[in-house]
Amino acid sequence: MSVFDRYLSLWVALCIVAGVILGNFLPGVFQTIASWEYASVNLVVAVLIWAMVYPMMVAVDFASLRHIHKRPKGLIITVAVNWLIKPFTMAALGVLFFQYVFADLIDPADAQQYIAGLILLGAAPCTAMVFIWSQLTRGDANYTLVQVSLNDVIMIFAFAPIVALLLGVTNIEVPWETLLLSVGLYVVIPLAAGASTRAVLVRRAGNGEHGEGRVARFTTTVKPFSILGLLATVVLLFGFQGHVIVEDPLLIGLIAVPLLIQSYGIFVLAYTAAWAWRVPHNVAAPCALIGTSNFFELAVAVAIGIFGLNSGAALVTVVGVLVEVPVMLSLVALANRTRNYFPTAVEETGADNTTVRDK
């Protein structure tokens, strides 16, 4: 594991502090960056998100979907939690807290924005960082790959309709054009680019070289750009919202409450279901973590495109970044400590048609 992965929470924390400081002392710079947009898409944010997502998309192997029937339990839990439960519980928590519990603390117009931001996070399950969480819990790499591949395919078709449905139910205007553009820019294009790169790498493997080995070396080479894209995005996002964070820290705490409840609640639900169904730990841990973590890059981009860089919705997605890393690391630690409660000697046919053993 690289130094970036090992101390990820530290780097993110430093970038958050740097972003807040720079945003308050150099607001003109961030206002200029905010003005660099076309068709409601901020060009700098778009480039950074592509830098983050593309290396991870190269690792996605759609051919692995041929094997989804061989070990279906983890996939069933992942799909059910990600697409049938998580978006709706996040929307419900948003309405509960910002229209009722925190009603006396927040302006009603702002409350709608915060609910919208929560909906965007809830409808965007993790598709990139889950590889890191899986690695930290010694997850089955092949199975995680299948989970992410299936998740990405579903996201192409399900993200925009679910967001539109939930925004409509909460009486928030739904700009379909921006939703579809965001899915195309931040899911379809990186996914297509990653699949094309993967196909070229596998095809060019020769002289006894295994195609997957070539792909692994390529992703290892470009992974630092993904991490740098993540850290630069964190600096930029917290720079845009730095003044709000400094002037109203209570608001950040209020936004964090439903996010924390959602994160720990979804993990407990998925992890308990995996335990009850006797899913091996190297599948159960990534299965629960993929639903808990968010594709915050997509949520941030859509929030900016629909509501603007300085909107309440964008602020919520930024707070999502602030909350996610420490929460996910705490859940990784919990998963590792509870490993012995899951099957430890289960043999199954893996996604690559080999026999694997969870030890």
Image: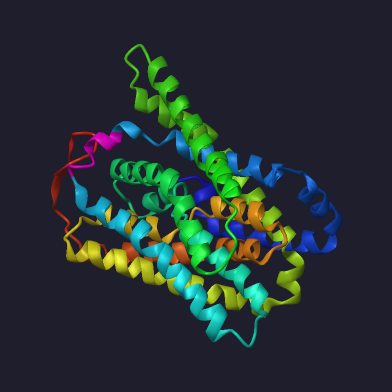
**Point 22% across, 37% down: residue:** 67
Residue 305 is covered by the magenta coloring: no
On the picture, is 150 further left or further right than 54?
Answer: left
Q: How many marks?
A: 0
Q: Nearer the viewer, residue 212 or 119?
A: 119
Position in image of residue 199 (x %, y %): 41, 23
Q: Which residues are magenta?
A: 64-70
Q: Position of residue 19 (x, y in %)?
A: 72, 59
Residue 10 coordinates in the image, percent (x, y): 58, 59
* Left or right: 83, with 29 as reference point: left
Front-lying residue, 105 or 230: 105
Depth check: 56 or 346 in front? 56
Residue 68 inside the magenta-drawn segment: yes
Q: Is residue 332 above or below residue 108?
A: above
Task: Say whether residue 52 is visible.
Answer: no
Query: In the rendered image, is residue 242 in sight?
Result: yes
Residue beneath the point at 49% across and 57% down: 163
Q: Residue 273 lies in what quarter of the image?
A: bottom left
The residue positioned 57% from the left and 40% from the top of the image is: 185
Residue 62 appears left or right of 8: left
Percent x, y of residue 294: 47, 57
- Residue drawn at x 19%, y 34% as measured from the top left: 353
